[in-house]
Structures are given as C-alpha cells and as structure tokens.
Amino acid sequence: MRFDIITLFPELFAPLLTSGITRRAYENGLVDVRLWNPRDHAEGNYRRIDDRSFGGGPGMVMMAEPLFKCLTAIRSERQECEPAPLVLFSPIGTKLNHSAVAQWTVSAGAVLLCGRYEGVDQRFIDQYVDRQISLGDFVLSGGEIAAMALLDAVARLQPGVLGDEGSHQLDSFNPALDGLLDSPHYTRPEVWQGHAVPPQLMSGHHALIERWRREQSLSLTAIRRPELLEEARRAGGLSPQDEVFLKQACGSGSTEDKPQSSKKL
C-alpha cells in the first residue's frame, strides 16, 4: 500500500512516520509513504505555487500547473496500469469514518493532495481529483493534519502494527461492536481518589464482564451518539437482550445503568 502526499510542508510528517506505535507500519513497508513538494515543480526563481484569486477576495489560491507537474511525476514513478485515485482534503468532501478507513486498508493506496491557503484552482480539481475527504465541519489551515489522520487510522489496522492483534476490533465504530461506542476502561489502582473499579470487572467472570461491557457500550452510545444505535438496530446488530436492556436503562430515565464514566465525558 503506497500513499504519495503532495504537500508544501513535508517536514510536518516526520513525527508521524518516526514516532508512536504506527511507525512499525512505515518502517516495515506495510504502508509506503512518499512526500512530494509541488514547489519543486514550480517555475521561476521563487518557485511560486500560489497566486491571487480572480474576482478578488482575501487569500491566495494554489496554482494548477505546479500541481499538475507534481502529479505527473508521481504517476510516472508509480507506473500503475490503473492510476491510484487523487484525493483532496476539502470541506465539501465526504466525512471520514471507520468504514471508509477500512476500505483504504485493502486498497493499493492513493495520492493525497494537501491544500493550503484559500484552496486549489478549481480547474485542477475538476480535471484530476477523484475523491474529496473531510474530517468534519470545520476548516484547517491545510490538508496535512487530515492526511495524517487518514494515514494513522489506516496504519493501525495493518496486521502486526498494534501489539495486540485484536485490539482495534474493539475500537469504537468497529463492526465487532456493531458500530457502537467502546465501553469505559479502568486500570490500577483498584481505588483511586475514593472511586473504585466497577465490581463486574473485578469478578473474574468472563461472561459477566462481556455483558457489562456490552451494556456500557449500549448506554454510552444511546446517550452520546444515538444515531449509531439506530444504525446498529437497522442492521440487525442488536439482540433481544440488548433491546430489553435499553428499554430498562434508557426508557425509564434512570441513571443507575448508564455508563459509569459518562459524567466525565
């Protein structure tokens, strides 16, 4: 899997590629990341890659020609029968979620374009961009943070990257949890500032622990992200036991069975 990243600030990616647990994916070649600066393909003494917007207005716009030349160099090096998609991180893009990340893990990768300033010349977007992705309804100074988010999410799903092979399967939004939120987690000491670990987790009873975690996941999702609960219900992911619990815990308005850490979220 190879990701070619078009960015004016390739140095921003150094900590991502050399630090943390996901560095294993880059060091072992599971995720091949190559950085390209469009300024290297610009003309003139100043290697200009942006200009004022036609029609006026604040800010600058990334020029089409340096981006085209940079993309051409990438395509030449990749030498693919079917060109990898060119992805632009943009506010109008489809929001990135777990399902989309999972699809990238079984792909051959992509070319990621990190926009800057007021954006990219629309003619380049119309001609060459295949997909647009957004992290959410907010604007970043550039696409680099969005690109890092995608790379990190994809890298941690690669076999052998995480210490525990099954770790990511219990992440929030994962199909193993029917797309629900993960349950709260606790570690030593057993009592901290007068607050004890839930007794179910200390019982040693695996079935009881599993059911407690499922109910915490259900409650937390119902409180924080009810739309995920409805999606799971439509997909047939909720068992009759789940439905009974939700009716008792949420329908009664009682907080007794709600996630024990929800007050801190």
Image (cartoon, rainbow, N blue to C red):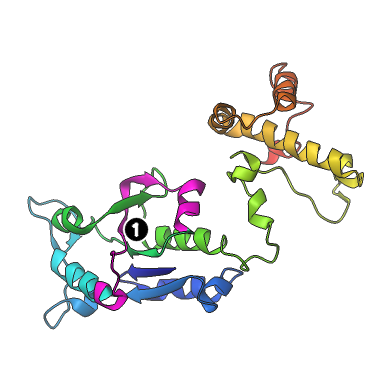
**Mark 1 residue crowding within 10 angstroms, few (<14) / some (14–19) / many (20+):** few
* Whether residue 113 is visible: no
| Residue at horizontal 23 percent and vertical 70 percent from the top | 71
Left or right of 171, for residue 79: left
**Residue 89, position in %: x, y?**
33, 55
Task: Give the quarter of the figure containing the C terminus.
Answer: top right
* Whether residue 27 is visible: yes
| Residue at horizontal 60 percent and vertical 34 percent from the top | 224
Q: Nearer the viewer, residue 101 or 52?
A: 101
Left or right of 229, for residue 205: right
- Residue, disc 1: 141
Which residue range is magenta in the image?
75-104
> Which quarter of the picture shows residue 12?
bottom left
Q: Which of 133 and 43 is in front in this view?
A: 133
**Residue 16, position in %: x, y?**
50, 70
**Residue 83, position in %: x, y?**
28, 64
| Residue at horizontal 19 percent and vertical 77 percent from the top | 41
Left or right of 1, for residue 23: right
